[in-house]
């Protein structure tokens, strides 16, 4: 984030401030980090271990999202599902995630960050088992809904936990691992799904759950949450465990307590407050970016990529594996340039690539539908889809979350972040549910529609979204309200 004070310490609205899967490192954090280095290995190994455990939840998130693509044909054949029934199965995941995202904050505030991760894991385990034993559509949908709920909770609690345990000089680098692990989970399930049955793939989803449950016994609770709950002794013990037994934590502990007290004195913002003139543009930017991120078609492509390759006459196995590799590589590279290249350039380049990719894919399906240049169809389709995921991973996937975390003033960050997150999951559900119906209507028309939406996204970014890289909260607000 660009505003270090927004996430520096835990607070009553921490979950509302950190609902994004990627939080960028900022200049202020880097400056503070230069003054606050934790040089000994002892002082950071528990932070690394805690992060490694937490991102098992991110990996599980990716597994849940990636399950439907390689299994569509097998599930529909084995259980004799109609197109509508499988569309419900594929899309109900995002409906569950909406519920999970909305309820995750109160759960994590009530039982702690580790407790929320345990609840999320329990839902995922129950969901995978329901899918594994399913004999019809109902059990499949219940299982998918449960894994979606767990996914929604993970989408909040993992980045919050990491941000709350990490020292300032490591926070940016560690929080980016969350998005990378989500992409890795999707990609691993894409690849494994090409060689195992759909029931075996469901059981595979239990592995990160088991690792996470065991790992939670080895790591401390978030010191910020403990301080907020008034558990003084446990707070100091947890902070000491994370910083090293020989580290003086008195200054950091005092900062955390002071910040929590300050935030608790702030008035609670309400939904109607967002429509005040001074906040309206910030809300338009945050919600608008989430709209274009999702309605540009990402969940249709992500959930059904194998079927897209098959429809175009290309090997689903080769295409899916290539897709998976590109997604991870580009996402990893993106985490290294987001604070160097700036937010707007990445968004503009990414959205332009999405328009081009959708156009290429539309052309391939048009040629197939009209039996023209049929030899060119597979290569055009695979080029378009791979360019699509590469472009999305380069900007539109992560940057909207980063910008959202930076543009809202702290007093409305919670409710505004919730509204933007709700838009994100609503868009994810809408696209994943309507994708198969749109493809039945017109395969090339579907991608022309996505291209048009992404083109509008370019215009939106160019005209409305300010550059937030390296700016303070006051500078960002001045630019927005100029």
Image (cartoon, grey):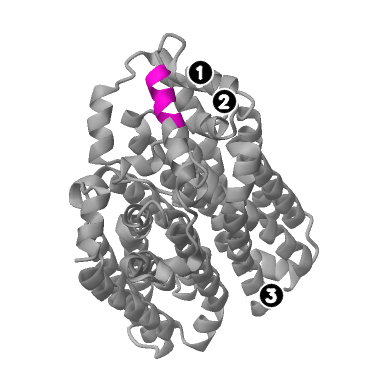
Q: Quadrant of the C terminus?
A: bottom left
Question: Is residue 196 placed above or below 167 in the rendered structure?
Answer: below
Residue bounds of the magenta highlight:
249-257
Q: Are marks 3 and 1 in contact (CB under 8 Å)?
A: no
Left or right: residue 419 versus residue 351 is: right
Q: CA distance from mark 3 to mark 1?
A: 50 Å
The residue that appears at 49% across and 22% down in the rendered structure is 239
Q: Are marks 1 and 2 in contact (CB under 8 Å)?
A: yes
Q: Which residue matches tag 1?
A: 241
Q: Which residue matches tag 3?
A: 85
Q: CA distance from mark 2 to mark 3?
A: 43 Å
The residue that appears at 22% across and 50% down in the rendered structure is 469
By secondary structure, the bulk of the magenta-drawn segment is best described as helix
Quadrant hosting residue 285: bottom left
Please, what secondary structure does the residue beneath circle 3 have? helix
Q: Residue 26: x, y in percent?
A: 27, 41
Question: Is residue 386 placed above or below 329 in the rendered structure?
Answer: below
Left or right: residue 439 versus residue 250 is: right
Q: Earlier in the sequence, mark 1 or mark 2?
A: 2
């Amino acid at each position: 984030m660009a505003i270090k004070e927004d996430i520096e310490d835990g607070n009553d609205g921490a979950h509302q401030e950190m609902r994004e899967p990627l939080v960028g490192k900022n200049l202020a954090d880097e400056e503070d980090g230069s003054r606050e280095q934790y040089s000994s290995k002892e002082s950071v190994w528990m932070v690394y271990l805690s992060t490694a455990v937490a991102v098992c939840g991110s990996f599980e998130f990716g597994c849940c999202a990636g399950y439907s693509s390689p299994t569509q044909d097998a599930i529909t054949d084995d259980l004799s599902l109609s197109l509508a029934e499988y569309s419900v199965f594929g899309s109900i995941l995002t409906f569950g995630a909406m519920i999970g995202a909305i309820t995750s904050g109160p759960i994590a505030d009530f039982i702690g960050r580790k407790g929320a991760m345990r609840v999320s894991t329990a839902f995922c385990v129950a969901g995978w088992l329901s899918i594994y034993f399913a004999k019809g559509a109902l059990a499949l949908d219940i299982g998918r809904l449960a894994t979606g709920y767990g996914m929604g909770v993970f989408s909040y609690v993992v980045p919050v936990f990491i941000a709350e345990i990490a020292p300032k000089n490591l926070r940016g680098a560690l929080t980016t691992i969350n998005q990378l692990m989500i992409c890795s989970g999707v990609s691993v399930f894409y690849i494994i799904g090409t060689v195992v049955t759909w029931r075996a793939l469901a059981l595979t989803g239990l592995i990160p759950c088991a690792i996470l449950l065991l790992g939670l016994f080895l790591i401390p609770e978030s010191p910020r949450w403990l301080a907020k709950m008034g558990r003084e002794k446990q707070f100091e013990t947890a902070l000491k465990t994370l910083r090293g037994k020989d580290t003086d934590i008195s200054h950091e502990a005092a900062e955390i307590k002071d910040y929590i007290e300050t935030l608790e004195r702030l008035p609670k913002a309400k939904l109607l407050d967002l429509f005040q003139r001074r906040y309206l543009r910030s809300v338009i930017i945050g919600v608008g970016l989430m709209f274009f991120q999702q309605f540009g078609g990402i969940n249709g492509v992500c959930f059904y990529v194998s079927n897209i390759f098959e429809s175009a006459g290309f090997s689903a196995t080769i295409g899916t594996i290539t897709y998976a590799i590109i997604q991870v590589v580009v996402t990893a590279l993106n985490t290294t340039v987001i604070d160097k290249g700036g937010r707007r350039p990445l968004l503009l380049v990414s959205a332009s690539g999405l328009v081009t990719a959708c156009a290429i894919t539309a052309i391939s399906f048009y040629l197939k539908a009209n039996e023209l240049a049929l030899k060119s169809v597979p290569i055009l389709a695979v080029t378009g889809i791979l360019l699509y995921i590469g472009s999305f991973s380069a900007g539109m996937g992560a940057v909207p979350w980063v910008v959202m975390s930076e543009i809202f003033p702290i007093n409305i960050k919670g409710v505004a972040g919730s509204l933007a997150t709700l838009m994100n999951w609503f868009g994810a559900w809408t696209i994943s549910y309507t994708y198969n119906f749109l493809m039945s209507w017109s395969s090339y028309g579907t991608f022309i529609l996505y291209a048009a939406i992404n083109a509008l996204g370019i215009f939106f970014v160019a005209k409305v979204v300010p550059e937030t890289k390296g700016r303070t909260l006051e500078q960002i607000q001045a630019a927005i309200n100029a």
